[in-house]
Amino acid sequence: TFVRRRFGLGVAEAFLRPFTSGIYGASPDNLGAADAFPKLVAMERRRGSVLMAVIADRDPKAAKRQVFIPAGGTESIPLAIAKALGERVRLSTRVAGLTPGSASQPARVHLEDGETLATNEVTLATRAYVQGELIEAEHPHLTDTLSAVTYVPMIVIAVGFPKDRGPEVPAGFGCLRGHGSKARILGATFNSKLNPDVA
């Protein structure tokens, strides 16, 4: 509704629908603009027009935006964090529950093997329904909300070709399937064009 109102039906169908399908795996009709595109909504609220906000916020001195991919691929980020933490990293360790902390008491992470860890902060990087299970004892009112979050089944496949054989990969970030296209993929990212070291 937001995009149709601001940019018209043609833009909504030709650009928004492929974009939300490729990024979120969902129809734009099932997404809220404030959640999916918070910057666009903020621009409109601030200037009354997305285009006027783009023009007003344009900085000719600003550096050109680039996509950053670490030389070893994105896996190198958690590997570097794990290396810095050393023996403090726990792998294959199941969490059974959480007890929130307070100003005078740390939070407690209860492990399935019976051990309890005290910590100042906890980051839940699991699916929403698992988060609901972990906090159910302390915050039962949030469990239903977290359990209602839906996930779109999606498969990511990496494909590589020898440099001297295979199709020519177009220059650019990638592509998204257009609305009405018979292509059997949602989109593709051309990582080797962004950083040859990851290929």
Image: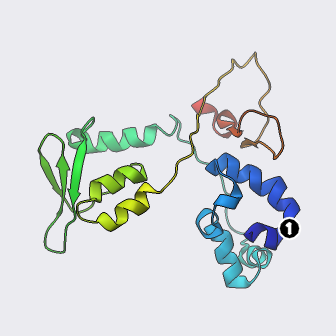
Q: Residue at x 81, y 45 (%)?
A: 178
Report if residue 125 is visible in the image. no
Horizontal relation, residue 121 to residue 70: left or right: left
Horizontal relation, residue 170 to residue 195: left or right: right
Q: Position of residue 17 (x, y in %)?
A: 76, 53
Residue 57 sits in quarter = bottom right
Residue 102 sits in quarter = bottom left
Label 1 crowd (10 A; few <14 / some 14-19 / many >=20): few
Q: Residue at x 71, y 40 (%)?
A: 187
Q: Residue at x 80, y 68 (%)?
A: 4
Judged from this view, the residue extending furthest toward the right is 10
Mark 1: secondary structure: loop
Horizontal relation, residue 74 to residue 87: left or right: right
Q: Position of residue 14 (x, y in %)?
A: 84, 54
Q: Is 178 or 62 nearer to us in this picture?
A: 178
Placement of the C terminus among the 4 image quadrants:
top right
Placement of the N terminus among the 4 image quadrants:
bottom right
Amino acid tagged 1? Gly
How many numbered discs sit on the rendered protein?
1
| Above-or-below relation of 167 to 130 | above
Q: Position of residue 71 (x, y in %)?
A: 53, 36
Report if residue 163 is visible in the image. yes
Q: Is 125 or 194 nearer to us in this picture?
A: 125
Q: Residue at x 14, y 39 (%)?
A: 113
Display colour scheme = rainbow
Residue 83 sits in quarter = top left
Q: Which residue is disc 1 drawn over?
A: 8
